[in-house]
Image (cartoon, helix red, strand yellow):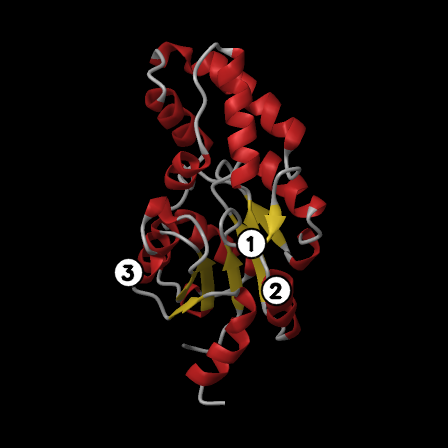
């Protein structure tokens, strides 16, 4: 692990357990359209690739006509905006982990595939926004994770080199983006990762809690 200048942190499944929000908003949307509902496990296996992918996958899962997408999108957006953060919770150890990173003088950014209009108020509501210099959603750049472009652009905004900017995430999207961007990677084990065990993905460390990062970094740096 090289000396770090910055840390770039994912949101859903890394900082905050937002499955409850997704389940409620999607089911209200489906109910509006007269469609059957979905369960928490389906969302856990599907979330992470952006809201459009989630909604299209949901419509396909319940056997809906793809032509309903535009109507479903409007309803989903309205429902999610109304309940954003009400059925979510910050994971144990997250605030302590972010506080430690901040205390080390690292510049912090949150980089998520969630739309920026949802990500910013959610972090505010959960008391985490103050840790981050930048908050970028999946609509902030031309492409989203697992493409490396958002990581490169975030590094530029933070004034950090990719090789000295730690990516912290919970899924293969984060892993692929970090590898392609040249960023060191830490993965948390409690997130979603499309129903797969994240420990199967190569990373500098796999953490059960974000506040374990200080100890692991000291170990890795020989401190």
Is residue 130 toward the left or the right of residue 78 in the image? right
The residue positioned 52% from the left and 33% from the top of the image is 22
Q: Is mark 2 on a helix, strand or loop?
A: helix
Residue 88, given in percent of the width and then of the height, sits at 61, 43
Task: Of the two numbered discs 3 and 1 on the same chain, state the one appearing first in sequence.
Answer: 1
| Point 50% across, 73% down: residue | 4
Q: Name the residue under label 3.
A: 200
Measure how far apart labels 3 and 2 are at the Cα level: 25 Å
The disc placed on residue 98 is 2
Q: Nearer the viewer, residue 217 or 193?
A: 193
Is residue 147 positioned above or below 83 on the image?
below
Which tag, 2 or 1, sits closer to the chain's start? 1
Residue that lies at the very extreme toward the bottom in this rendered image: 223
Q: What element carries label 1?
A: loop
| Mark seen at residue 15 | 1
Image point (37%, 10%), residue name: 67
Residue 219 image position (x, y, % from top left): 45, 84
Whole-number angstrom distance, CA of label 2 to CA of label 1: 9 Å
Could you say which is closer to the camera, residue 53 or residue 44?
44
Q: In this view, does 197 lie to the left or right of 2?
A: left
Residue 100, position as x, y percentages in the image = 62, 72
């Amino acid at each position: 692990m090289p000396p770090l200048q910055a840390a770039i942190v994912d949101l859903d499944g890394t900082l905050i357990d937002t499955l409850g929000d997704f389940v409620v908003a999607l089911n209200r949307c489906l109910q509006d359209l007269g469609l059957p509902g979905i369960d928490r496990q389906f969302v856990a296996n599907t979330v992470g690739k952006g809201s459009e992918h989630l909604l299209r996958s949901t419509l396909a899962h319940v056997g809906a006509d793809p032509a309903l997408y535009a109507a479903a999108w409007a309803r989903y957006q309205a429902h999610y905006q109304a309940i954003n953060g009400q059925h979510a919770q910050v994971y144990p150890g997250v605030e302590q982990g972010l506080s430690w990173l901040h205390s080390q003088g690292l510049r912090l950014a949150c980089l998520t595939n969630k739309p920026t209009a949802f990500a910013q108020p959610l972090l505010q509501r959960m008391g985490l926004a103050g840790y981050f210099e930048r908050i970028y959603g999946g609509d902030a750049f031309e492409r989203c994770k697992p493409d490396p472009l958002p990581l490169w652009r975030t590094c530029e905004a933070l004034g950090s080199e990719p090789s000295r900017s730690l990516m912290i995430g919970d899924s293969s999207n984060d892993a692929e983006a970090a590898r392609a961007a040249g960023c060191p990677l830490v993965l948390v084990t409690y997130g979603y990762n499309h129903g797969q065990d994240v420990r199967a993905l190569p990373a500098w460390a796999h953490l059960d809690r974000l506040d374990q990062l200080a100890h692991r970094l000291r170990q890795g740096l020989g401190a």
